[in-house]
Image (cartoon, rainbow, N blue to C red):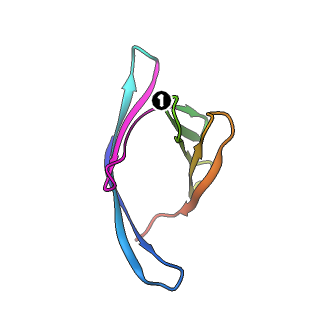
Amino acid sequence: MVGDFEQDQYLEDGTFVLKWELHWVCGWDPFSNEYRATIADCYGHTEIMKGRIEGDVMVFESMRETPPMLRMTWDASSPDLLLWRNEMSSDGMSWQLVEEYLMAPTD
């Protein structure tokens, strides 16, 4: 799967700050028996992640062992909504929520 994603970011008073953009490439790695993803965003951040699917939930986590580590989760257990979570960790064991969105199909 390959995707380009974007998000307009605003200050609390509604002032536009920037358009965040991300390029995502992922696929199955038969040698490690798990998914792999590479990401690059407009801030110059790059990451290689490992992923797994558990039922209706897909999880990708940073492969590096130096902070900050990222975890992205897509929960498709509801037929009408997709819950996406972005978390980070400084030790790989305790995770803090950065952002969470409910996504629904558009017309």
**Which residues are drawn in magenta?**
33-51
Note whether 15 is above or below 44 in the view shown.
below
Q: Which of 72/95 is in front?
A: 95
Tag count in the figure?
Answer: 1
Q: Secondary structure at mark 1?
A: loop
Residue 98 spot, x, y in % from top left = 58, 56
Q: Which of 60/79 is in front?
A: 60
Q: Main secondary structure of the magenta part?
A: strand
Note whether 32 is above or below 82 in the view shown.
above
For badge 1, the amino acid type reads Arg
- Residue at 39 percent across and 26 percent down: it is 28
User: Alpha-carbon neighbours of circle 1 within 10 Å: few (<14), some, or many (≥20)?
Assistant: some
Q: Which of 38/64 is in front?
A: 64
The answer to whether one can see residue 80 in this image is: no
Q: Quadrant of residue 36?
A: top left
For residue 45: magenta? yes
Note whether 20 is above or below 92 in the view shown.
below
For residue 6: magenta? no
Residue labelled with disc 1? 64
- Residue at 58 percent across and 58 percent down: it is 100
Q: Quick one: which residue is furthest to the top in this view?
A: 31
Q: Quadrant of residue 82?
A: bottom right
